[in-house]
Amino acid sequence: HALDAEITEVKRPNDRGTFSRDNPICTDPLVVLRNAGGTPLTSATLTYQVSGGQPETFTWTGNLAHMEETEVVLPVPDGAFWTGDADHRFTVSVSAPNGGTDQHPFNDSYTTHFELPPIYQPDVFLFYQTNNRPWENSITVRDIWGNVVFSRTNLTATTLYRDTLYLAEGCYTLEVMDTGNDGFSYWADPAQGSGQFRIRQVGGTTVKTFNPEFGRSIVWAFAIGNIVGVDETAATFGISAHPNPTTGRFTLRTGEVHGDGDLRVFDALGHQVLSRQVVLYGDGRLDLDLGDAAPGLYHVRLSCEGRTAEVRVVKQ
């Protein structure tokens, strides 16, 4: 085949043990693209999404000879990309090689299963103790777009640190580097001493303890606040939205529930965009309007008489 682009691997998101150092994530996926065709591959379109989520597309350009491959980072706009269903499956497909038609479509798609990173409530702090070689270490926290929101270098030997992270709701990645490739502790090199590294909740308990023998790096993704919605199985009555997707106005069908209610709408990052006190008369409907809210995914949460239900609404 002259035109045959294929996806040979998804390195993230992927819960396979081989890729455990780079997973879980809530940032950009990383896939492997290969040219299985006889013609050099110079462009292709990649479409990707999580099960139950909204698809994104990315146009790759480059130059791959026959059977040559490259890693491709697939950008996500924000944490809403990861809001899907309980299957937690990621699928990427490649199409339009060199702007043409793929002559062997059976290798165009790749699906993985993944786990979402843990969600911590604000605020958390990094609790760690250096060993005898602190000059080998650096600590960085980045947001979903790769911006550095915290960094620490020039550490002091055998010192206990408590660095509080005042982070907004969203996705973050912690990276602890060791240029000596022997972590905070290594059994074959006792002269470097031993350190520790944990994430702790302010005023609470330890939420993550890392193995000090981490070698070159720790890479740990986590989320602050409610970025992907609440567990919908916790609802004790059902609601639905129509039309969905919507351009703004929609009707919330509430069934025969009646009484005083509390209605709240959150965006995918957990920011509240609407709050109303409502009275439900058992007639089964509420008319709502997202107004000037930006296009995207929203969580509509209705509480009434001690019961709560939630539905996801997409605004186009």
Image: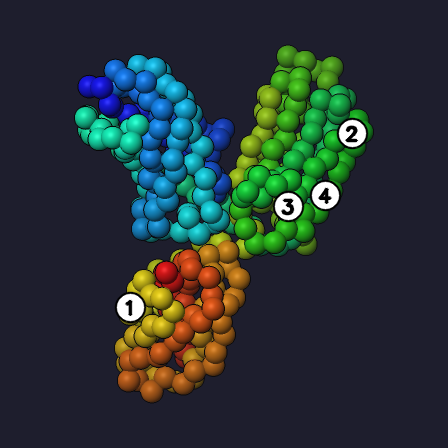
Residue 155 visible to an observer of this rendering: yes
The residue beneath circle 2 is 154
Mark 2 or mark 1: which comes first in sequence? Answer: 2
Per the rendering, the mark at residue 163 is 4
**Which residue shows up at 49% across the image and 28% down it?**
21
Whether tag 4 and tag 2 are in contact, CB under 8 A, the answer is: no
Give percent across and percent down for residue 24: 46, 37
Relative height, residue 38 to residue 147 (above, below): above
- Work out how far the residue at label 4 is from the one at label 3, CA to CA, in angstroms: 10 Å
The residue beneath circle 1 is 243
Name the kind of residue labelled 3 in the image: Arg
- Work out how far the residue at label 3 is from the one at label 1, CA to CA, in angstroms: 43 Å
The residue beneath circle 3 is 200
Mark 4 or mark 2: which comes first in sequence? Answer: 2
Give the crowd class for mark 3: few <14, some 14-19, many >=20 residues within 10 Å. Answer: many
In the image, is 290 to the left or to the right of 8?
right
Give percent across and percent down for residue 44: 33, 31
Mark 2 or mark 3: which comes first in sequence? Answer: 2
The part of the image, by quadrant, that contains residue 67 is top left
Whether tag 2 and tag 1 are in contact, CB under 8 A, the answer is: no
**Which residue shows up at 39% across the image and 20% down it?**
63
Whether tag 4 and tag 3 are in contact, CB under 8 A, the answer is: no
- Work out how far the residue at label 4 is from the one at label 2, CA to CA, in angstroms: 14 Å
Name the kind of residue labelled 1 in the image: Pro
Instruction: Give the secondary structure at mark 4.
Output: strand
Instruction: Give the secondary structure at mark 3.
Output: strand
- Work out how far the residue at label 2 is from the one at label 1, CA to CA, in angstroms: 56 Å
Name the kind of residue labelled 2 in the image: Asn
- Work out how far the residue at label 2 is from the one at label 3, CA to CA, in angstroms: 22 Å
